[in-house]
Amino acid sequence: MTEDDLRQLIGRVQRGALSRRGFVRRLATVGLTAPMATQLLAIAGAAPAAAQNQPAYRATRRGGGGALKILYWQASTLPNIHFAVGTTNQDAARVFYEPLAGWATDGTLVPVLAAEIPSVENGGLAENGRSVTWKLKRGVKWHDGQDFSADDVVFNWEFARNPQTAATTSGSYTGVNVVKVDDFTVRVEFDKPTPFWADAFCSASGALIPKHLFGSFNGPNARDAPNNIRPVGTGPYRFASFAPGDVLRGELFQNYHGENRPFFDTIEVKGGGDAVSAARAVLQTGDFDYAWNLQVEDELLLRLEAANRGKVNIIEGSNIEHIQLNTTDPSQEVDGERSSIKTTHPAFSDPAVRQAMALLVDRNSVSQFIYGRGGPAASNFLHAPDRFRSSNMRWEFNIARANEILDAAGWARGRDGIRAKGNVRLKFLFQTSVNAPRQRTQQIVKQAAGRCGIDLELKSIVASVFFSSDVANPDTFPKFYADMQMYTTTMTQADPQRFMSQFASWECAAKANNWQGRNAPRFRSEEYDAAVRAAEAELDPVKRAALFIRMNDIVVGSNHVIPVVRRPLVSASLNTLRPVLSAWDSTMWALQDWYREA
Amino acid sequence: MAAPAARKRVGPWGEAWRRFRKHRLAVVSAVVLAVLILGVLVGPLFWTLPIDEIDFSARLAGPSWAHPLGNDDLGQDLLARIMYGGRISLAVGFAAMAVAVTVGVAVGAIAGMAGGKLDAVLMWVTDLFLSLPQLPLLLLIIYLFRDSLKEVVGPEVGVFILIVTIIGLFNWMQVARLVRAQFFSLREKEFVEAARALGASRWRLVTRHILPNALGPVIVAATIDIAAAIIAESTLSFLGLGFPPDIPTWGRLLFDAKDNLDFAPHWAIFPGLAIFLTVVSINFLGDGLRDALDPRRVI
């Protein structure tokens, strides 16, 4: 899809020929996030004024809802948003702290501590893309009774950008300048024109901590602040108790700024266990109200749901389960590292082999029989076809064609049935993390590959190792000491810039950068790099969107990245609970709106 | 004068067999174990369904004529997988036991016969091994040697050798202590002193007189080791460090089945039953063997 196509599509929305929802969905198939799509509509003046599919809040008074019990199978350890590592800690912090605005699941920005969302029309957004002015909500109180003001907002910027505090949120606050205009107005100024302005103070990592409690800890002593584990925020629930690695408790905050909110009297976020037992605790026994992130085979969820106590919530995001084919040779050691970019993969350097591998992934079966609702079949997220309507057609599972392609490329079957050319045999090591659906997928791919004369050796690695950044461990995914690997890339930002830049050549994981680079398959393409650089500075959202689509085209077209299934966020809640969830923000992003129906 | 009832002359093994037969459970266990071993060895010759044929139309299907033990969630035939897995699990169990017993008996015997400083050093080593945290060390060894071994002998054999060696090397300590204690008491016994007085060499003393008499507890310990090895292998598979995930060892089958326990119980029950029957029958067998081989025990 080109820039022109995009403009046509936006025009159709303006004329009313295409619904906003349809527009967002179409863009999703070519890899653009809902927030991005909504931004495009905003430019054309076709954006919805407010979030469209926010469920109505029906509680008529504050409190009286009893206890809300939430289950995370990973426990939180540090509920300070600026030190939060991983989703669990971010979510735990988000129970108490709030940002200026959060992302609804339809991609609209919803004000939380802001009075309104800045736009060009209301003067909040500078036309040249170099500043954004936020008006703050008045009358907001911290849990200890102090008033919330612009000073707190400015302080969070100072705190997060201070290298001595080593905040995990620093990425959102470097390269920006924050100015207090008056007690309830702040202006965020950018060094260069910035298309994605809703990063600082927004979404999960943009939550705000109080200046009056952390002011004296803006330095090397930041980790010693007593309130790191006793959060005092502006959220709907105030802190009650916290046992790191176990349970976090909160109670209703009487002076919360939302009308009639919150509904529940107490909240408990319990950590630990595994995904399956978490699903059982909600769907089968009803011990908990809500269970987070259920990476469980759908078959199991369906059967648990049959108990009719709870339901499974599926929120479309843009996480994608994909298989990577190594561009480098994992068996050859160069300068103390394997999979070095100085090598090329003996078999995958042949496009025919990569194309055959892509044909051998039976996405339909994986989606239908393994992931079910948790992994929609048409997994073209990273794949941008020429015309998006044909997107589902081009991808196929076809062993016969894979065989033809390999025959034509000169990979002949040996006596043991395994194809070879010269002294290169099509025998690959295929690794992934220990996770039942992934092992099943591995087996499905292995069987298809076997019928095509490709022998796969399967390897599964404990998730805590596979996804760790442990430099000494050879089994991590950035090291990629295997021919193929499979995992889900998560979208950590509402804007696709960071997500798409993961396949830029400078992101290649290597010994030189302690394997911190995000480009695990070591994909390199000059055209791709150029597109990433261009998108960074492109202010015209339509042109920028076209660039992202081009990036999709390049990386997926190379078959070094084979999308398998999309991974929406799957969670479980009791039938009576009305959670408000979003794929673009923290699970707790709208905790104040959760209520229970009688 | 009535002639004394003619008594058939029986050798020591015949005697042992006679005593073994009196332990009913042990005999039954021996039969069960024999059936299991025969089943996994010969069974695949008759039951020729492939272990990895995926058939989504038969996913989680219960036992039927076409698939007597049912199917797993990919529709793969469980009978074929259990027989294949049994070969691996039993081989791991017996081989690891052999390693543990060999090392244990050797260390125990040397310590027991030598006494003094050598004994003290060997017991320190034993204590050292007992105090080592097994799992972290296992992980370390597997990380260090898996890839190099894989290149030499291939992934399955490589992992097999590693697992057998590691499990064996972590289970010899009990055996060593048992053997040493037995040696201490036996080497002072009259029959040993008699043999020594007759000029028997040390080697002969150990192999002909002391060791056979010390074997009872060793056999029981060995049977426990087999069970421990089968279970240790499943732990490793669980951590993703054992055999590749598509190799259906019994532990692996159980691990895969556990999430579906409430609606596809057959998937877990059959491999679980196989492990249970193996371990229980080996234990009873060991019990019976100990009775049969202990000359001091009157049956």
Image (tube, coloured by chain):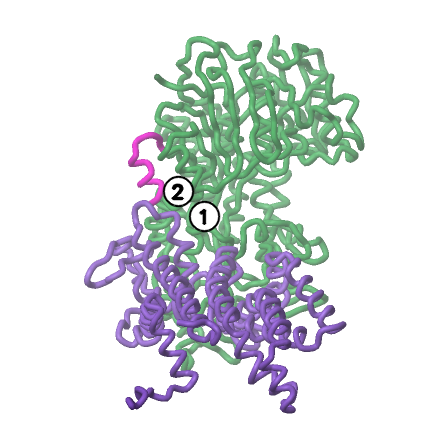
Q: Marks 1/2: CA distance?
A: 22 Å
Q: Chain of mark 2?
A: A
Residue that extends furthest to the front in the rendered view of this protein: B1
Residue B103 image offset from top left, x and y in percent: 60, 74
Q: Nearer the viewer, residue B169 or A76?
A: B169
Shade representing chain B: purple
Residue that extends furthest to the left in the rendered view of this protein: B65
Does the magenta-highlighted stretch encompass residue A6?
no
Q: Nearer the viewer, residue A427 or A77?
A: A77
Q: Which mark is residue A384?
A: 1
Residue B197 image offset from top left, x and y in percent: 65, 88
Q: Is residue A347 left or right of residue A476?
A: left
| Amino acid type for the residue under numbered disc 2 | Gly
Residue A266 image offset from top left, x and y in percent: 51, 19
Circle 2 residues within 10 Å: few <14, some 14–19, many ≥20:
many
Against A369, residue B231 (above or below) is below
**What secondary structure is marked by label 2?**
helix
Q: Nearer the viewer, residue B191 or A285?
A: B191
Give the quarter of the image for residue A330.
Answer: bottom right
Against A502, residue A132 (above or below) is above
Q: Which residue is mark 2?
A: A374
- Specify the chain shown as green: A
Stretch of the chain drawn in magenta: A299-311
Give the quarter of the image for residue A349.
Answer: bottom right
